[in-house]
């Protein structure tokens, strides 16, 4: 769970569950990752891209997911160039900044360097309290949050936690230290 250090969790945040994440450094042979993401309507992560990671975003249900996409330029900023991507394995051509709608069951393949952000479409998710939620999945190459994420605005991927009770579970970035592993960059 993160607000990316911005203090506006309802607008700019994420709740992610890392189900698996391999590492090429430890010889596990597991060079892939999988996450579940809760997508409340209109809550977005900052625009970002990955240097190496290719990922499929899968709408696992509840409502629609809106995805904004840009090709990155040489400086890592939004380009005005058109681009092609795959939705459900079919190539599609899009203009810079296009919004795509993924309905339940649909998926989008995001290659390295493609700037993106996605969120639950307003009014389409499962109602819980005063919001609606969609669940998305991410299946990708190994997720290296320290070296592979490129944010277009200043933010923190792992924010300082203000503990109000003792921690019961490890967060994804705490596992290496808990297992006595070091230098896991």
Image (cartoon, rainbow, N blue to C red):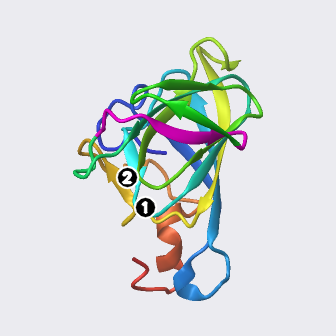
Q: Is residue 85 above or below residue 130?
A: below
Count residues near mark 1 (Cα–Cα under 10 Å), then give few for <14, some for 14-19, many for 20+.
some
- At x 47% / y 27%, what residue is drawn? 43
Is 166 situated left or right of 102 in this image? left
- At x 34% / y 29%, what residue is drawn? 8
Q: Nearer the viewer, mark 1 or mark 2?
A: 1
- Is residue 181 or residue 91 the one in the foreground? 91
Taking the image as drawn, is residue 160 in sight? no
Q: Are marks 1 and 2 in contact (CB under 8 Å)?
A: yes
- At x 39% / y 32%, what residue is drawn? 12
Give the quadrant of the C terminus.
Answer: bottom left
Q: Secondary structure at mark 1?
A: loop
Give the alpha-carbon distance from disc 1 to disc 2, as whole Å.
7 Å
Taking the image as drawn, is residue 79 in sight? yes
Report which quarter residue 169 is drawn in: bottom right
In terms of sequence position, does the residue under pointer 1 or pointer 2 come before the other? Answer: 1
Q: Kindly identify which residue carries mark 2.
A: 157
> Where is residue 167 shown, x and y percent of the image?
52, 59
As drawn, the label of residue 145 is: 1
**Numbered range of the magenta stretch:** 78-89
> Where is residue 165 shown, x and y percent of the image?
49, 52
Is 173 situated left or right of 48 in this image? right
> Where is residue 150 shown, x and y percent of the image?
33, 53
């Amino acid at each position: 769970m993160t607000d990316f250090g911005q203090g506006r969790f309802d607008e700019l945040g994420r709740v992610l569950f890392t189900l698996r994440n391999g590492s090429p450094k430890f010889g596990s042979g597991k060079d892939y990752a999988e996450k579940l993401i809760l997508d409340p309507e209109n809550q977005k992560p900052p625009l970002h891209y990955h240097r190496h990671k290719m990922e499929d975003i899968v709408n696992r249900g509840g409502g629609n997911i809106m995805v904004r996409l840009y090709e990155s330029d040489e400086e890592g900023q939004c380009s005005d160039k058109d681009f092609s991507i795959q939705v459900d394995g079919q190539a599609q051509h899009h203009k810079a900044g296009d919004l795509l709608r993924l309905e339940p069951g649909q998926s989008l393949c995001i290659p390295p360097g493609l700037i993106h952000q996605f969120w639950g479409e307003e009014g389409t998710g499962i109602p819980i309290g005063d919001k609606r939620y969609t669940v998305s999945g991410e299946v990708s190459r190994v997720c290296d949050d320290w070296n592979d994420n490129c944010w277009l605005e200043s933010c923190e991927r792992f924010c300082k936690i203000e503990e109000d009770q003792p921690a019961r579970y490890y967060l994804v970035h705490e596992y290496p230290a808990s297992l006595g592993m070091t230098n896991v960059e």
